[in-house]
Image (spheres, rainbow, N blue to C red):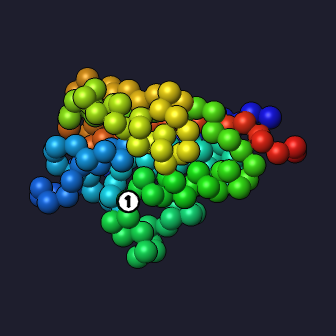
Amino acid sequence: MIRVGMGYDVHPFADGGERPLVLGGVTIDGRGLAGHSDADAVCHAVTDAILGASASGDIGRHFPDTDPEWQDADSIELLRRAAIVVRNAGYAIVNVDVTVIAQRPKLSPHVEAMQRRLAHALGIVPGQISVKGKTNEGVDSMGAGESIAAHAVALLASVLSQ
């Protein structure tokens, strides 16, 4: 059996310049995003995609933003934990495809590092991860450079007889 899940996340840029920008587990030069954890929109979208595909809930169920334990949490670690939930539910991750929508910064120099970090957290190889960046052509908060969003799709295969 194969299962498909999709995830989405968006975060506005944080006020001030103290917080680092983290996307796909990679720290990138630039102003960071606002959020309860490290606000890694890529990891959050992938987490929701794999949890959704395995019918295991969502990131908010497993790592609620009302729980102080997850304040400033490393989202690549949350993704690693979600991958364990997925494996324990009897699924293997076949591939993940991510689209990051950001007017800035330019993501292409960071794509391979993101693929490596995401693959390591998921227990798969980088060739099973696609990460691509798109601008929003000046439209809405992403196009105005006020936020970053990520969409992710995950394909899982059952490793247990259903």
Q: Does the rendering let one see residue 107? A: yes
Q: Position of residue 105 (x, y in %)?
A: 20, 35
Q: Amino acid at mark 1?
A: Asp
Looking at the image, residue 62 sits to the left or right of residue 33; the answer is right
Q: From this viewpoint, which residue is outermost toward the right?
A: 162
Query: On screen, 20 above or below 160?
Result: below
| Residue 125 x %, y % | 52, 34
Residue 39 in percent (x, y) is at: 34, 54
- In this view, the residue farthest toward the bottom is 68
- Image coordinates of residue 90 in percent, x first then y, are 75, 49
Report the label total.
1
Quadrant in the picture for residue 26: top left
In depth, the one of 52 and 113 nearer the eye is 113
Q: Is residue 9 left or right of residue 82?
A: left
Q: Residue at x 41, y 30 (%)?
A: 131
- Residue occupying image coordinates x 66% and y 51%: 86
The answer to whether residue 45 shows anywhere in this view is no
- Per the image, the residue denoted by label 1 is 74
Identify the residue at horizontal 87%, vertical 45% (top origin). Answer: 162
Left or right: 118 as drawn, with respect to 107:
right
Measuring 38% from the left and 59% from the top, which residue is drawn there?
74
Please state, as top left, top right, bottom left or bottom right, where the N terminus lies in the image.
top right
